[in-house]
Amino acid sequence: MLTSVNASNRRRMTVFFAGRVQGVGFRYTARTVAAGFELTGIIRNLPDGRVELVAEGERAELDAFRAALHDAGLAGFIRDEQVTWADAKNEFRGFEIVR
């Protein structure tokens, strides 16, 4: 259970990945990588060819997760990524692929 101190440190990171990010196992790799981190969220393909990632956790954990995605072999598929930060909404259970 999160204490109020930990809850206030939780952030929400939304990332839109563009490039050759659909049909290359991007979402499945992200789900596998997420298992090694203390975070929750979703990842999904968008109709315009991008992939949307929404994850919540401590800022340092989210930054490390994003770096780990690149290190997991996904960097070569990413042409651009747009990142935004907000307060966590605590609406996710685990990390899952949404269709």
Image: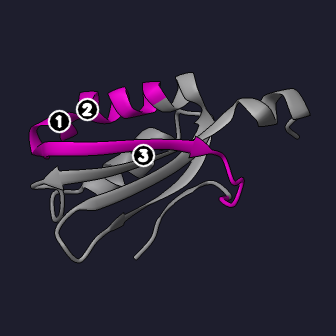
Where is residue 24? Give x, y as percent: 16, 57
Label disc, if present, on residue 70 of the rendered structure: 2
**Disc 3/disc 2 C-alpha distance (Å):** 13 Å
* The residue stretch that appears in magenta: 63-92
Q: Secondary structure at mark 2?
A: helix
User: Residue, x 43% and y 51% (percent of image)?
Assistant: 31
90 or 73, which lies in front?
Answer: 90
Q: Nearer the viewer, mark 1 or mark 3?
A: 1
Where is residue 11? Give x, y as percent: 62, 38
Q: Secondary structure at mark 3?
A: helix
- Residue 3 at least partly seen: no
Q: Nearer the viewer, mark 3 or mark 2?
A: 2
70 in the magenta segment: yes
Where is residue 82? Give x, y as percent: 29, 45
Q: Is residue 77 above or below residue 51?
A: above
Kindly identify which residue carries mark 3.
32
- Among the 4 quarters of the image, the one containing residue 68: top left
Instruction: Indicate the amino acid at tag 3.
Output: Thr
Report if the CB atoms under discs 2 and 1 are less than 8 Å apart: yes
45 or 24, which lies in front?
Answer: 45
Kindly identify which residue carries mark 1.
75
First of labels 1, 3 by sequence position: 3
Where is residue 74? Give x, y as percent: 20, 40
- Among the 4 quarters of the image, the one containing residue 73: top left
